[in-house]
Image: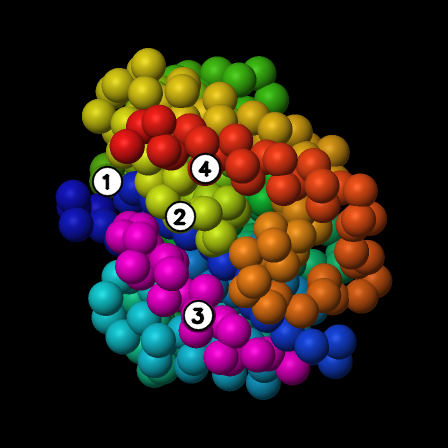
């Protein structure tokens, strides 16, 4: 893609506030999204893993996306998650997202039966002919239990509309090597970004195009400081910003980022509802640790300003 690709910089992944029955609270959702737009994130990705797409009925996913399109109103690019169990459902979600006004798609290969590389290629091929929106490949083996091979990513990059890949953190920590491998095997111009927030600083300093960020869904200003410093190649500022996040990264690794995000949202007064069952809220004692982690990030921001 050209430099104007929507899959560059900081992409914020917000929660989807909902009640115990999975009914989306569109007013609370709009408040979350307005904060992200005001902070100046480069894109917003709704209905990703942090957006609990897998726990929502398709009608509620549609309501959430409609609310997001209305709230964001073209002020920043809006990416819609479209992962689902059946390819026919994924195609329907892709078509709906385009008609409703999303700017891009994020596709994870969701399945109960383990998928082969060819089966995943077939799903992306089907979606690429359904919608004209740019598509980001969502490589998230911790939730889908599917890992994209470099060969498959290269094949996919040659399909129409495949514009980006969202990668997990490399097990060996070799971001430069992995980014180089992906770029050499892919169609020229595909952007390479990473999730796994505690590795974002290293990924961006190694030349990644994007940070697909959980924490930016609630703390966009702090995430932007880290992103802008890293993209500028300012190692000192990047490491300082990342150090302020370290207690939060430890919580993410210990409890899972989704559970911690609900605590953060509660502490910020954003009314996220409770995690969708069977996921349980974290104990109150963890909330105290989260509070301390947020205070450290706030102090770091005050010093940086």
User: In this rendering, would 49 be left or right of 182?
Assistant: right
Give neighbour class at mark 3: few <14, some 14-19, many 20+ (Cα, 10 Å).
few
Which marked residue is nearer to the observer: mark 3 or mark 1? 3
Q: Is residue 20 magenta?
A: no
Query: Do the CB atoms of the residues marked 1 and 4 lie less than 8 Å apart?
Result: no
The quadrant in which residue 19 appears is: bottom right
Which x, y percent locates residue 239? 40, 18
Tell me the residue at 16%/44% (across/down): 3
Q: Which residues are magenta?
A: 23-44
Q: Earlier in the sequence, mark 1 or mark 4?
A: 1
Q: Earlier in the sequence, mark 4 or mark 2?
A: 2
Query: Do the CB atoms of the residues marked 2 and 3 lie less than 8 Å apart?
Result: no
User: In this rendering, would 2 be left or right of 24?
Assistant: left
Q: Earlier in the sequence, mark 4 or mark 3?
A: 3
Answer above or below: position of 297 versus 271.
above
Answer above or below: position of 33 versus 70.
above
Which marked residue is nearer to the observer: mark 2 or mark 1? 2
Give neighbour class at mark 1: few <14, some 14-19, many 20+ (Cα, 10 Å).
some
Answer above or below: position of 38 versus 172.
below
Using the numbered discs, state the Cα–Cα distance from disc 4 to disc 3 in whole angstroms.
21 Å
Q: Kindly identify which numbered label has been placed on residue 31.
A: 3
- The residue beneath circle 1 is 189
- The residue beneath circle 2 is 220
Using the numbered discs, state the Cα–Cα distance from disc 2 to disc 3 in whole angstroms.
13 Å
Q: Main secondary structure of the magenta part?
A: helix
Q: Kindly identify which numbered label has been placed on residue 298.
A: 4
Query: Do the CB atoms of the residues marked 2 and 1 lie less than 8 Å apart?
Result: no
Using the numbered discs, state the Cα–Cα distance from disc 4 to disc 2 in whole angstroms.
12 Å
């Amino acid at each position: 893609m050209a430099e104007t690709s929507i899959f560059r910089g900081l992409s914020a992944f917000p929660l989807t506030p909902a009640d115990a029955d999975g009914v989306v609270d569109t007013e609370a959702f709009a408040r979350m999204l307005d904060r992200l737009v005001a902070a100046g994130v480069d894109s917003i990705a709704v209905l990703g893993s942090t957006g609990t797409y897998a726990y929502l009925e398709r009608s509620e996913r549609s309501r959430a996306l409609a609310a997001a399109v209305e709230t964001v109103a073209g002020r920043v690019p809006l990416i819609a998650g479209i992962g689902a169990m059946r390819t026919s459902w994924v195609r329907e979600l892709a078509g709906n997202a385009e008609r409703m006004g999303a700017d891009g798609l994020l596709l994870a290969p969701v399945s109960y039966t383990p998928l082969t590389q060819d089966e995943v290629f077939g799903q992306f091929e089907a979606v690429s002919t359904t919608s004209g929106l740019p598509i980001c490949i969502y490589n998230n083996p911790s939730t889908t239990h599917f890992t994209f091979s470099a060969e498959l990513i290269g094949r996919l990059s040659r399909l129409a509309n495949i514009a980006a890949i969202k990668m997990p953190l490399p097990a060996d920590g070799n971001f430069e090597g992995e980014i180089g491998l992906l770029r050499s095997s892919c169609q020229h111009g595909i952007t390479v970004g990473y999730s796994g927030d505690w590795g974002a600083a290293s990924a961006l300093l190694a030349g990644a195009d994007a940070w697909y960020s959980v924490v930016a869904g609630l703390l966009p200003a702090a995430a932007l400081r880290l992103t802008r410093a890293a993209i500028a190649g300012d190692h000192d500022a990047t490491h300082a910003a990342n150090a302020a996040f370290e207690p939060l990264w430890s919580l993410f690794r210990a409890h899972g980022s989704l559970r911690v995000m609900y605590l953060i949202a509660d502490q910020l007064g954003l009314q996220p509802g409770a995690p969708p069952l069977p996921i349980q809220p974290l104990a109150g004692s963890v909330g105290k640790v989260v509070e301390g982690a947020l205070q450290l990030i706030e102090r770091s921001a005050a010093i940086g300003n």
